Amino acid sequence: MDNNTLGPLQKTIVGVQFLFVAFGATVLVPLLVGMDPSVALFTAGVGTLIFHLVTKGKVPIFLGSSFAFIAPIIKATELYGLPGTLSGLVAVGAVYGIMSALVRFRGIGFISCLFPPVVVGPVIMLIGLSLASTGVDMAKENWLLAIIALLTTVIVSLFGKGLLRLIPIFSGIVVGYIAATIMGLVDFQSVADAPWLALPAFVRPEFSWEAIIFMIPVAIAPVIEHIGDVYAINEVAGKDFVKDPGLHRTMLGDGLACVAAALIGGPPCDHLL
C-alpha cells in the first residue's frame, strides 16, 4: 500500500500520525533547553511557511525543532543567558545564508567535495545517537509503560498489514496512552486548568559577541544534516530537489526560518519528513 492507493480517510489517519510525530519532536527540544514550547510551535509554523515560500512550495517537509542544537543551547544559556544565546542562533541563520550563496555560485560540486557522503551519514547518525541518553532518562521514569509503547510500535511495524503498518508510531502512542490511563498515570487536571487562549512567551535576543562566536561553529553539523535530509527527501518523494528548486534555496529557507525563530525566542528549525 502506498500513498497513491490511500483513500481520504486513510490519508487522514496517516496525517494524524505525522501530526503526533511532528508535535512531539517540536516541543521536546524547548522542554529540554528551557524554552517555551508554545513559542516553538509558533516558530515551527512560521519557519515552515518561510521555507515553502523560498523553495516555491516544491519540497514536502515540515520544519520542527532541531535536535542538533540541544547541548549547545543548554550550555550557551548557562554562559550568556537565553537572550544572548538567541543572538548566536541568529548568526547560525546567517551561516546558512552564506552556505546558500556558496552553493548558488560555486555549484553542488563544492558541497560534494566539502561534505562527501562518508561525512554526511555519520554526522546524521551521531545527532540521533546523542539523544539516546535523553530517551533512556525519560523511559526509566516508568519502564513498563515505555516498553509497552515501544513493543507496540515494533510489532505493528514488523507484522502490521495494510494501513496499520503505515502507522506504527501512532499505534504505539494510542496503546501507550490507554495503558497509562488504566495505570492512573494520566492527569487531566492540568488540561482542565489551562486557559483556552494565551500568547506564547516571546523573548527578544540581546546582542552578544561571545554567544555568536560560541554558536557559529555549531552550525556546521546542522548544515551537514540539511544536505543529508534533502537527499533523503529526494528518495522518499522520487524527485531531485537538489536541482529543483535547488540546494541553495533549501539552505536559504532553513537559514531564514532559523533567524525568524531566534528573533522571537524559539529554537532553530529542522526538517521533519
Image: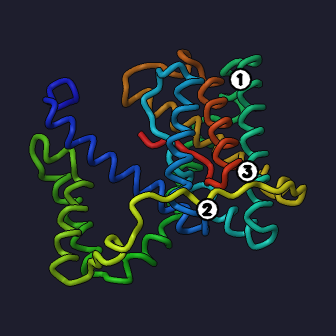
| Residue that label 1 marks | 103
Image quarter hosting the N terminus: top left
Q: Secondary structure at mark 2?
A: helix
Separation of marks 3 and 1 at Cα, in angstroms: 21 Å
Q: Amino acid at mark 3?
A: Leu
**Which residue is at the far right?**
209
Separation of marks 3 and 2 at Cα, in angstroms: 12 Å
Give the mark, 3 or 1, whose residue is nearer the N terminus: 3
Q: Secondary structure at mark 3?
A: helix
Q: Amino acid at mark 1?
A: Val
User: Which residue is located at x 53 percent, y 19 percent?
Assistant: 56
User: Which residue is located at x 73 percent, y 52 percent?
Assistant: 218
| Residue that label 2 marks | 70
Give the mark, 3 or 2, whose residue is nearer the N terminus: 2
| Residue that label 3 marks | 89
Q: Secondary structure at mark 1?
A: helix
User: Which residue is located at x 55 percent, y 68 percent?
Assistant: 32
Which of discs 3 and 2 lies nearer the camera? The answer is 3
Separation of marks 1 and 2 at Cα, in angstroms: 27 Å
